[in-house]
């Protein structure tokens, strides 16, 4: 995964728990391009690697990357490090932008955001409306107005901002009752919202529904297999209840990890033999041919041979 070293040029508290971070090249050069729906993986000062959506529309020559981070005191420490350890002029290592949630052409759109799930959808809505696109509807569901990032931006006739503390849960069925092939639905938010939207759109064509998970989806079905650690030929049994990452570590194989949810790419391994059941949200189809993420992916075959992944860490940027 190629990496960039960027400098924080601005921080802004959007709510008591959500902070905006603007990152630029220290030399003022333009950054690699990206489109709405893209994310970057940020290495926090405490060493965590976390995936954050880029909240601006992007384009061919962006001058900055902007992410928003909600502080989660009960999490694994990544968001706390971003809030407590990052300030203006802090340098951060970030990945090149990747996009597993692309904005596809459609006559009309319905965007459904839950809480901090607004971040990738904001980029999409802003891009479409800047281009003069009509039929761009947003449902933005939050707990209360105080915790609603970008609240002032979404007050138009096609925006519905709903706070559960005031009005309870919004009845979503009227928005999905009649399937419409001219509408694409994009949804991002916490797991209960995602499950609800999936259930309510079961009668829609699958190609019209697009969702981004906060963590990589798991199939829930695991079978045991054997992993061969290629550098020394060590054979490691991976039982159904353990991840490949956990089994390798238990056997004394030092595999680096961070999110352990399939969204950062830190625990990527090379696959030399065997078939993989990929469950991550990071690798491209091409990368999946020769590598896997040990935290969430497993073997389809009874045996798999893996080795450390060689990371290319370089970045060159220039203005034309």
Image: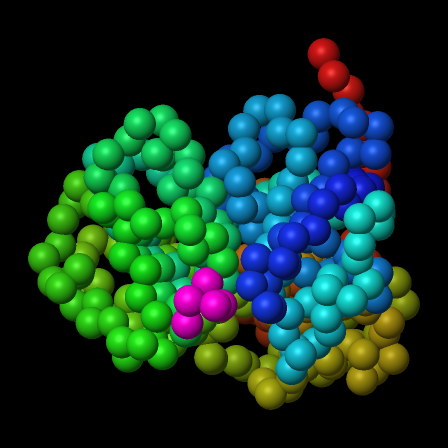
Look at the picture and state if 209 lies above or below 22: below
Magenta stretch holds residue 145: yes
- Residue 302 lies left or right of residue 232; in this view the side is left
- The reply to whether residue 174 is visible in this rendering is yes
- The reply to whether residue 282 is visible in this rendering is no
Start and end of the magenta stretch? 144-148
| Residue 132: x %, y % from top left | 31, 27
Give the quadrant of the C terminus: top right
12, 127: nearer the viewer: 12
Magenta stretch holds residue 287: no
301, 207: nearer the viewer: 207
Name which residue lies at 49% across and 68% down. Answer: 147
The chief SS type of the magenta part is helix
Name which residue lies at 76% across and 42% down. Answer: 9
Residue located farthest toward the top when viewing the structure as drawn: 320
| Residue 37: x %, y % from top left | 48, 45
Name which residue lies at 63% across and 74% down. Answer: 72
Look at the picture and state if 16 lies above or below 60: below
- Residue 296 lies left or right of residue 4; in this view the side is left
Name which residue lies at 74% across and 62% down. Answer: 82
């Amino acid at each position: 995964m190629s990496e960039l070293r960027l400098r924080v040029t601005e921080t802004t508290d959007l709510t008591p728990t959500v902070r905006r971070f603007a990152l630029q090249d220290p030399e003022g050069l333009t950054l690699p391009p990206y489109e709405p729906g893209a994310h970057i993986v940020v290495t926090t000062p405490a060493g965590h690697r976390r995936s954050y959506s880029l909240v601006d529309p992007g384009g061919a020559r962006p001058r900055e990357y902007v992410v928003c981070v909600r502080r989660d005191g009960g999490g694994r420490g990544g968001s706390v490090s971003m809030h407590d350890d990052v300030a203006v002029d802090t340098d951060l290592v970030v990945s090149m932008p990747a996009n597993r949630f692309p904005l596809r052409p459609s006559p009309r759109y319905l965007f459904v955001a839950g809480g901090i799930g607004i971040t990738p959808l904001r980029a999409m809505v802003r891009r479409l409306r800047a281009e003069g696109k009509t039929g761009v509807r947003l449902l933005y569901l939050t707990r209360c107005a105080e915790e609603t990032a970008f609240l002032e931006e979404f007050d138009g006739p096609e925006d519905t901002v709903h706070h559960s503390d005031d009005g309870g849960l919004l009845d979503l069925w009227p928005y999905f009752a009649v399937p419409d092939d001219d509408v694409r639905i994009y949804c991002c938010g916490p797991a209960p919202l995602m499950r609800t939207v999936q259930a309510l759109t079961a009668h829609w064509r699958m190609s019209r529904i697009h969702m981004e998970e906060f963590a990589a989806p798991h199939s829930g079905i695991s079978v045991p297999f054997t992993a061969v650690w290629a550098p020394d030929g060590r054979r490691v049994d991976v039982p159904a209840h353990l991840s490949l990452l956990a089994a390798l570590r238990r056997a004394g194989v030092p595999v680096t990890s961070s999110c352990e949810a399939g969204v950062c790419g830190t625990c990527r391994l090379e696959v030399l033999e065997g078939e993989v059941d990929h469950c991550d949200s990071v690798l491209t189809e091409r990368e999946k041919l020769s590598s896997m993420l040990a935290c969430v992916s497993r073997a389809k075959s009874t045996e798999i041979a893996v080795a450390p992944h060689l990371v290319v860490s370089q970045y060159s940027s220039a203005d034309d």
